Image (cartoon, rainbow, N blue to C red):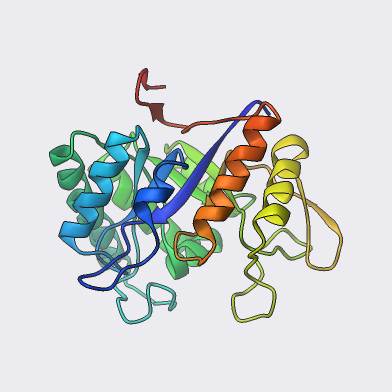
Amino acid sequence: MTSIDLNSDLGESFGAWTMGDDEAMLEIVSSANVACGFHAGDPRGILSTVRAAAKNGVAVGAHVSYPDHGGFGRRDMDVARDDLVADVIYQIGALQGIAAAAGTKVTYVKPHGALYNRIAHDPVQGQAVIDGIKAIDPSLILMGLAGSPILDLARSSGLSVIAEAFADRAYTPDGQLLSRRLEGAVLHDPTQIAHRMLRLAKEGTLEAVDGSIVRIEAQSICVHGDSPSAVAIAREIRRLFEAEGIAVHSFTYDSHRGRS
């Protein structure tokens, strides 16, 4: 692999409450999954993040979620199909308006938190998310968990997809993310994480929590913006990749060439 996308969940601050360091991350990553107000983010903060993404030539994606401010979008919800379709349309539409005002555009969609995990294997909610995306803009790319059924469902429904791996999360032997409820689920050491991701980029494999080797085919790597060491992790990944001849750029566009 000679190039790969590096993404982060951003725009999650709310009022006087600051989440992560968007400004620093947007100087490192190539794609920004921007909160749309359902799990985090307020209009002013989201606009600021999108403006910074545009300034840095970073691709903007809609980080759609369950309506769950209190749980930061990490509580599973049995949302009716029509409600979920409308929620997805509403969130993408809001971010599209902000992106237009900032001189850029939304090019992909990445569900957040519990919704991301639920649709990875739930075809009912997964199809609702897909239908919401197609209703507002069928050219949008869906980012989903590498190896999960949602990617095949989206392809069969006519959407382009990008498979994603997580830099700062541990994996089970079957290639799934280790639950955040379990010890060791979130990784923190930038050097260790960067070398794990270099192995992923070069070989398509990761070491699982039990020491076994799992195959993960991914075109994008996520560093969670709310991790205390997020900036250090992203910076070390990019430094190591570039030292090894692996370019970091978005799967959708760069600031000079437009949509690919």
Vertical side of 30 occupied by 43: above or below: below
In screen coordinates, is 39 left or right of 48?
right
Residue at 76 percent across and 61 percent down: it is: 174
Q: Nearer the viewer, residue 95 or 184?
A: 184
Residue at 62 percent across and 42 percent down: it is: 218
Vertical side of 51 occupied by 11: above or below: below
Q: How many marks?
A: 0
Q: Nearer the viewer, residue 254 or 165?
A: 254
Q: Nearer the viewer, residue 157 or 108?
A: 108
Vertical side of 55 occupied by 216: above or below: below
| x then y, percent, for residue 154 | 47, 45
| x then y, percent, for residue 242 | 63, 31
Quarter of the view holding residue 39 = bottom left
Residue 28 seen in the current view: yes
| x then y, percent, for residue 65 | 35, 64
Residue 152 seen in the current view: no
| x then y, percent, for residue 111 | 41, 57
Quarter of the view holding residue 181 = bottom right
Position of the C terminus, as image quadrant, is top left
Residue at 19 percent across and 51 percent down: it is: 47
Position of the N terminus, as image quadrant, is top right
Q: Nearer the viewer, residue 141 or 256?
A: 256
In screen coordinates, is 234 left or right of 52?
right
Vertical side of 75 occupied by 257: above or below: above
Residue at 47 percent across and 62 percent down: it is: 116
